[in-house]
Amino acid sequence: MVFDSNPPVKRLPFVEFAQQTVTKKPSGISGRRRIITQMLTDQERAILLEFLGFGNPRAPIVFIGMEEGLTETPDYPLLAQLKDRARLSAVADLRDSSVHPDKYLVGPRPPIQRTWGILIRVLLALNGKPDPNTDDVRFYQRDELGSLIGQSLLLELLPLPARSVEFWAPYDRYFPEFPTRDEYRRTMMQRRVGYIAEHLSYGPTLVLAYGVGYWNEYKSLFPLVESWTREGVFAYGRYGATAVVLTPHPVARQMNGQQGTLCALVRRVAHRSISINL
């Protein structure tokens, strides 16, 4: 199976222009950052709201979460992060983006990020490693996850990173059209469902979407799925050659003791053979 590692990603013309004018590559999150005092420009806001995620834009394996977690430090405050994120394409390489903690992506033995760790176990199971050891997971996280030329794509329903589902200020100042998180979620969800569904029209082999509170939104991404089958804490369906699996969040209590069951389910419902270059 051959996948185009550099497909076109639809963006607004002024967004493309804004990206072309950027020449300075952001430094890693672990380095000391400049102090940002200005607000976001209109172009930056548009880019941030159209962000899709990290990885190969046409990956055979797609993971969809509700929104990215926010890692904020005194040396790297939110506005500085948003400025850096506004330099990214709609789909970016996880390592080259420089907006995630270096500790997970560099070094001889980086710690395993909890959510990524479960997703990686799914990827490895699909490659015939249903019981990988921690180093298998660790090195896949460091070297392969979310690569532009890899086999995974990490998408988010909502485009802005957040500390929690209650987190909003100071986004109300950066995005005055959304005075509350509820308004942001309601408006953006309507836009994002169509946007993400259009992007996935290339037909991935497997989509795994996690977070029980968002299952209805996930289902709306796949209107061609005729029926959903419940199996324990999971649900799954199919349209064409694409299998869709809905799960609780990987680190939710419902997932305690369920990793092996999830990997077995995914291997069973993903009917096409998948070759992942590890």
Image (spheres, rainbow, N blue to C red):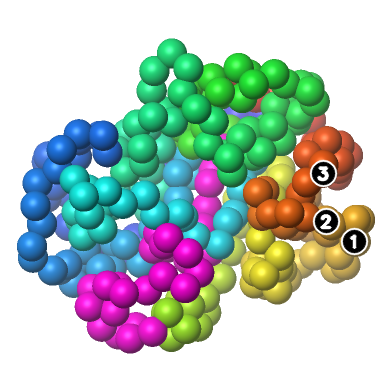
- Residue nearest the observer in this picture, 232 or 43: 232
Q: Provide the secondary structure element on which disc 2 rests.
A: strand
- Relative to 120, does residue 115 appear above or below in the rendering? below
Q: Which residue is at a point 48% across and 17% down the rendered structure image? A: 109
Q: Residue at x 75, y 30 (%)?
A: 126
Crowding at mark 1 (Cα within 10 Å: few <14, some 14-19, many 20+): few
Residue type (three-letter) at the residue carrying disc 3? Gln
Amino acid found under the numbered disc labelled 1: Arg
At 70% from the left and 18% from the top, the residue drawn is: 133
| Residue position marked by numbered label 1 in the rendering | 230
Secondary structure at numbered mark 3: loop
Residue that label 3 marks = 258
Q: Amino acid at mark 2?
A: Phe
User: Which label belongs to residue 64?
Assistant: none
Whichever of labels 3 and 2 marks the residue nearer the N terminus, that label is: 2
Residue 252, above or below 277: below
